[in-house]
Image: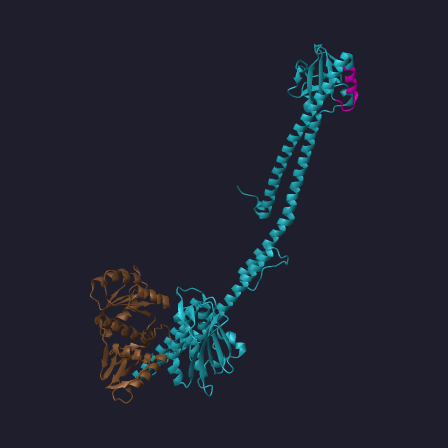
Chain colours: A cyan, B brown
Amino acid sequence: MRLPAIMKTTAARLSALYLLLFGACAVLLVIYMTSISVRIIAAQNQETIQEEARNLVRAYERGGIPRLVRVVEQRARQPGANLYLIADPNGRILSGNVESLQPGVLELEGWTQRPFAYERYGDTGLGQRAPAPEAARGGLPHTAMALVIRLPNRMILLVGRDLGEPERFRRVVQRALILALAFMGIGAFLIWFFVGRAALRRIDSISAASQRIMGGDLSGRLPVSGAGDEFDRLSANLNAMLTRISALNEGLKQVSDNIAHDLKTPLTRLRQRAESALAGSKDEVALREALEAAIAESDQLIRTFNAILMISRLEAGYSAESTDRIDLAGIIADVAELYEPVAEERGVTLETRIAKPQTVMANRELVAQALSNVVDNAIKYCAGHAAAPAVSIALDKADGEVRIVIADNGPGIPAEDRERATERFVRLEASRTQPGSGLGLSLARAVMTFHRGRLELADADPGLKVAMIFPAAGAAS
Amino acid sequence: MKILLIEDDREAADYLERALNEAGHTAHVAGDGETGFTLADGGDYDVLIVDRMLPRRDGLSVVAGLRARGQRTPVLILSALGEVDDRVTGLKAGGDDYLTKPFAMSELLARIEVLNRRAGSGDVETVYRAGDLELDRLSHTVRRAGREITLQPREFRLLEYLMRHAGQVVTRTMLLENVWDYHFDPQTNVIDVHVSRLRGKIEKGFDKPLLHTVRGAGYMLKAG
């Protein structure tokens, strides 16, 4: 079944559902209440009739028929009186306020089993009070219930009560029910119109904004009304997500720019070398040299490429590489020993300051690689810069964090450039001439991120201080 | 040396086959894992070179299958994956060495040479000799022409590795992997400086060079 278009909106469907639910509840409630009320009224009527009948029987016992007739006529005249009737054994009406009644009622004794029709004296003059359906029962205008009593002298006494009252009550209740249902319908419509449509409009505006953003305008943001409701929270969260995506996008763009620069330059060089080797003299030595240079160039490219891949993998957090409890002092000693001859060759003093072993959960290979990158940088940059170039590697623990601090007395990095220095590919302009992929610090940072630690750059005054900080949680005591 | 190369990339396989033949080996090529497995299982090869990613049967599964059948032929695994864990899984599957693509031909040749020699001699020699140079692994002493040379522990291990593979080309990566147990690429040629320092100690005051640099490949310890 196809719903009309308007029913496709959540608000309309909710309104309809509420309407249905409340309507059903109201109808059930009313039915229940009427049936109970009717039953109570009937019981009350019965009691009244019984009481009345007892009084009349008592009056008959005291004064016989004349007294009974007197009492009946007196009561019958009162306004809103019950029905009274005295008839002879043949059913001929002698006294009371009932002019005629459904045949057969007076043959009964006791309570009438079901309502019967009757006509009261003076009804024709007072106008038709009873509605048509009841008049249809044998042409008599009213219905009543009654108690029929045979007096000892075989006379018939009938005391009854008109049933118009519960009927009227039922009609009132019916009208109230219809009115309530109508109000509910109007209410549901109003709720849909004001609340539902307002919510829908906001969802639509979020939809439209998302579509705009998807269309390419990543700087766009979703509207926030300031009401602080769930729509605002949704928008705020989506906005935060967009900001993150933008940042990632920006990073990606920067990376591709950098790749374009750092890979294109050596690739171009490689191509030029091959080209000039082809074009130049066919001297075998020259050709050989050109080829060797080309191989060296491609090796450098592969190195850069591997570093990029590794950084991406580490940053993505993806790696099945497990960590072990390792002693950082051992790694520092290893790396220092590995670099010591290089440092010496370049006139750099390389010293380690290790007070005691520090065990952390880490990957030995990765930490060693990060450390050697940092140490390699430190040696490269301070060699030939300071009068007595020196690099130190210290291991300590502060506030539960285990730190490897590598300090040099080289040119350092200006405070404003430090953050940028660990970005992928960034080799600060001043140092473009130094060999290397430019990824050393970025890789070290990625390794520290992988270990849920961090890499901090500071001023060694003079020189650069790099701290590889392992988190307290990852550190084993 | 009789070599089986299991590699699905035709161009790479042709190039490797030619280079291996030029180096004096006999190379056979299998284009997929299943064929490679059958050939390796039935043939009498000295060394297997197995690419990790192969059609029909994965390289690691080929190696594991051969090992399960009691095949002891040394295996060099080639892979484009170069992370530490990839290497570990490769060696766990039964590979003897692991080389990441792209690699220098000299690196491959040096490694299969070492693999073949290692398989040939199940030796546990206590004293290595090369000309008048002598290294005693038990007493941790090095002598040349009877004169004792004092080495740092790492220098000793470096020389030990070079002497164990005397007459073979040993690359810088092989030294870093076997002497330092690191598999990453140090940006600077730290190994060269270590080797030249060692060379200074074992050759200073002697006429004959022992530790030779092999251009574009690595080093070789050789008497005469």
**Is B106 drawn above or below residue B81 in the view shown?**
below
For residue B40: magenta?
A: no
Residue A430 visible in the picture: yes
The structure residue drawn at horizontal position 52% and vertical position 63%, both measured from the top left corner, is A245
The structure residue drawn at horizontal position 67% and vertical position 16%, both measured from the top left corner, is A105
Describe residue A355's horizontal placement relative to residue B191 as left or right. Answer: right
Choose between A355 and A322: the one closer to the eye: A355
The structure residue drawn at horizontal position 41% and vertical position 65%, both measured from the top left corner, is A319
Q: Position of residue A381 (x, y in %)?
A: 45, 82
Quadrant in which the N terminus of chain B appears: bottom left
Counting the numbered discs, the total is 0
**Is B8 drawn above or below residue A199 in the view shown?**
below
Residues in magenta, as a range: A68-81
Describe residue A16's horizontal placement relative to residue A169 as left or right. Answer: left
Q: Position of residue A351 (x, y in %)?
A: 42, 81
Choose between B187 and A187: the one closer to the eye: B187
Describe residue A278's horizontal placement relative to residue A122 as left or right. Answer: left
> Predominant secondary structure in magenta?
helix
**Is A387 drawn above or below residue B87 in the view shown?**
below
